[in-house]
Image: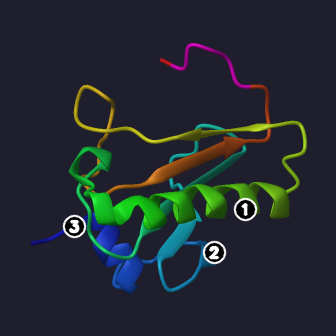
Amino acid sequence: MSCLFCEIVEGSIPSTAVYQDEQCYAFADIHPQAPEHVLITPREHIGSLADCIEGDHALLGHLLWTAAQIAHAKGLTNGYRVVVNAGEDGGQTVDHLHVHLLGGRPLTWPPG
């Protein structure tokens, strides 16, 4: 199975790393929707939030904790948005669970 984000995580597709640990890899989005747009993805392939199982709850918490740590490190003191798209109707375009961290400008609602 070929997965774009799996290839980014393993390093066969270049990316601009923002953070990494044993559970996740965060990198700059190549089509940013805000001045700061980081994707945080688990190293393990999980298709989407809808595919998570009960044993994934610690990983899901870790992804959100990572987003908060990156936001703090980037100085997003006026706020930021964390988004997880699930499935085609939810706007997910890469079938690998990932969290979007967006900030650096005022963000409007609804998002789209």
Magenta segment's dominant SS is: loop
- Sequence-wise, which precedes: disc 3 or disc 1? 3
Work out whether 17 lies above or below 70. below
Closer mark to the observer between disc 3 and disc 1? 1
Q: What crowding class fits label 1: few (fewer than 14 Cα within 10 Å), some (14-19), or many (20 or more)? A: some
- Please tell me whether residue 8 is drawn above or below residue 62 in the rendered image: below
| Quarter assignment of residue 19 | bottom right
Q: Residue at x 41, y 59 (%)?
A: 57
Q: Image point 62% across, 14% down: which residue?
A: 109
**Label at residue 19:** 2
Image height check: is 99 above or below 112? below
- Left or right of 55 on screen, residue 101: right
Q: Position of residue 112 (x, y in %)?
A: 47, 17
Q: Earlier in the sequence, mark 2 or mark 1?
A: 2
Tag shown at residue 70: 1
> In which quadrant of the rendered image does the N terminus lie?
bottom left
- Left or right relative to 73: residue 51: left
Amino acid tagged 1: Ile
- State the residue at coordinates (32%, 75%): 44
Q: Is residue 89 above or below residue 32?
A: above
Q: Which mark is residue 3?
A: 3
Question: Please, what is the three-letter code of the amino acid marked with disc 3?
Answer: Cys
